[in-house]
Image: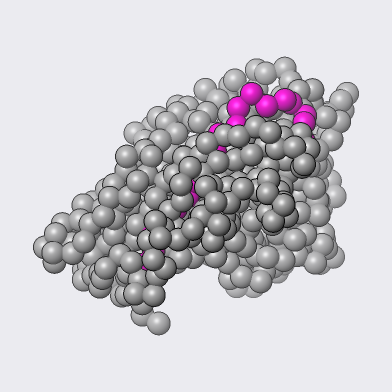
Amino acid sequence: MEIPDFGVPPELARRLSMAEQYEYLRNRMSRRRTLVTAGAVASGLLTGCSGGDVRDVRPANAPAPAATVPGSALAPFGRHLAFGADPMRQLRISWQVPLAVRRPFVRVGLRPDDLGRRVGAEVRDLTTPALGDHPAAEQYYLHAALDGLRPGTTYYYGVGHDGFDPAAPAHRGTIAAFRTAPATPPRRFVFTAFGDQGVGARAVANNRVLLRQDPAFHLHAGDICYANDKGRGTASDLYDATQWDRFLRQTEPVARSVPWMVTTGNHDMEAWYSPDGYGGQLARFSLPDSGFDPRTAPGVYSFRYGNVGVVALDANDVSYEIPANLGRTEGRQTRWLARTLAELRAAPEVDFVVVFFHHCAYSTSTHASDGGVRAEWVPLFARHQVDLVINGHNHVYERTDAIKNGAVGRPVPVGEWTDPTRDGTVYVTAGGGGKELYGFPAGVPESHEGRIAARDQPIDSFRWTRSRDRRAETVEWSRVRYRGFSFLRVEAQAGAAPRLKVSALTPAGDRVDHFEVRRGR
């Protein structure tokens, strides 16, 4: 189906930044005498809509305003957790309600039958008008900050509001649990990762197998739900806000107990809400405030769990392929990254540094490699000997050998190990979270556990340049390729011989890749 452009000339849509798209849409709405609505986003961001087929913000079949609906009839849904800046003592609980409620809160305690602590929640409202065939949406996201928690402790919690108390017998089935990070690095723990999830049966299947790994947290490398289904960073991107409702319901069975640590992909830029495209993400997620500017770069932060330091980045800021937000932070993110990597490397309790973001530094699939990521960040990864980089964007699983100075520093076949202090960094594209799959260049075979290619071969691929040209390159670093749905399972081990044991698993639980990272061995 042809995507409507709402009257934006194609040549204009291609060259607009996110801020220009936002202003263009606001001006167009004004000319058409359409509706602009301010949402109650706590950050003060203007929430609104794009131009085009705009009707009243409330669908004709919508329920009555919340004032006439008893709180007991409004069940919370879409719970998702995230760490605060200190995973040992801080956790953020987020959820959604179908209509506005009074005095939302979280109950929390050390036993499911004793939720004695009550913490008030913040409401962030997003209003989206009807666009084309997509309905209008009034969405209410609630967030509670839990601070002063005990390290290494299991807590039970329930969310509610006036008229809906999770401690009441009728609602005790909604009580869930989470566990804070331990004060002393555990001998082992597991975390998981993928990108490009969306909504559907494959995403659900990945979630189910992922939950069986008992992860301490999950890293989502962007392109979260595909409400913006084109992700081109143009004013004509189609947008369905209700896709977020479906996504959060789908994710709740995992994210209500596993901190769901997201970053920002190209499909997560939504120009309807703010000049930078991130107003929607700020409303829906509460993430660590450990980045350089949490209010304008919500997908940029770091945290430590056990012997692993984790860094989340917003690759829209450096992407040559989709430049709608290229240079938005004027280099602040990259300077923050340099400081953060140096601090993590200097921390005696940190053995491994893992970085995740959306656009690929090294891939041969459909979007290939982003030259902006390579120019801005890869030198920093090399300087600070980053142990593992996780990307999405390409809807496949692809894993490199250890890369040093842009070439293979050490071959890392399936089942082998590498030392970043000597060999370089391994880059993993984990874009098989659930969205439709991509492939590899013509004639390039899959190569993974159970189907190892007969011989290594150079692959003709390309990287994006600042001018948005595709510069051809022949690469030898593509070691494992799997065209299927999958997620990453990483087991971190501490002690005298620390290691990261990295595996890629399918929704059926089959393993398609595994290797180890060992430092100074």
Q: Is residue 354 left or right of residue 333?
A: right
| Residue placed furthest toward the right | 496
Q: What residue is at 83 percent from the left and 29 percent from the top?
A: 186
Q: What residue is at 68 percent from the left and 45 percent from the top?
A: 167
Q: Is residue 173 left or right of residue 246?
A: right
Numbered label tally = 0
The magenta stretch spans residue 154: yes
**Dominant secondary-structure state across the stretch colored magenta:** strand
Using the rendered view, name the quadrant where residue 232 is placed.
bottom left
Q: What residue is at 68 percent from the left and 65 percent from the top?
A: 204
Q: Position of residue 500 (x, y in %)?
A: 79, 38
| Residue placed furthest toward the left | 31
Quadrant where the N terminus is found in the figure: bottom left
Using the rendered view, name the quadrant where residue 317 is placed.
top left
The magenta stretch spans residue 260: no
Using the rendered view, name the quadrant where residue 31 is placed.
bottom left
Q: Is residue 501 left or right of residue 463?
A: right
Q: Which residues are magenta?
A: 136-155
Query: Can residue 287 be seen in the rendering of this structure?
Result: no
Q: Position of residue 154 (x, y in %)?
A: 77, 36
Q: What residue is at 76 percent from the left and 23 percent from the top?
A: 183
| Residue placed furthest toward the bottom | 1
Q: Is residue 456 left or right of residue 339?
A: right
Q: Position of residue 517 (x, y in %)?
A: 78, 38
From what the image shows, is residue 377 above or below residue 285?
above
Q: Position of residue 311 (x, y in %)?
A: 59, 35
Quadrant where the C terminus is found in the figure: top right
Residue 476 or residue 271, whichever sits in front: 271
Residue 502 or residue 142, whichever sits in front: 142
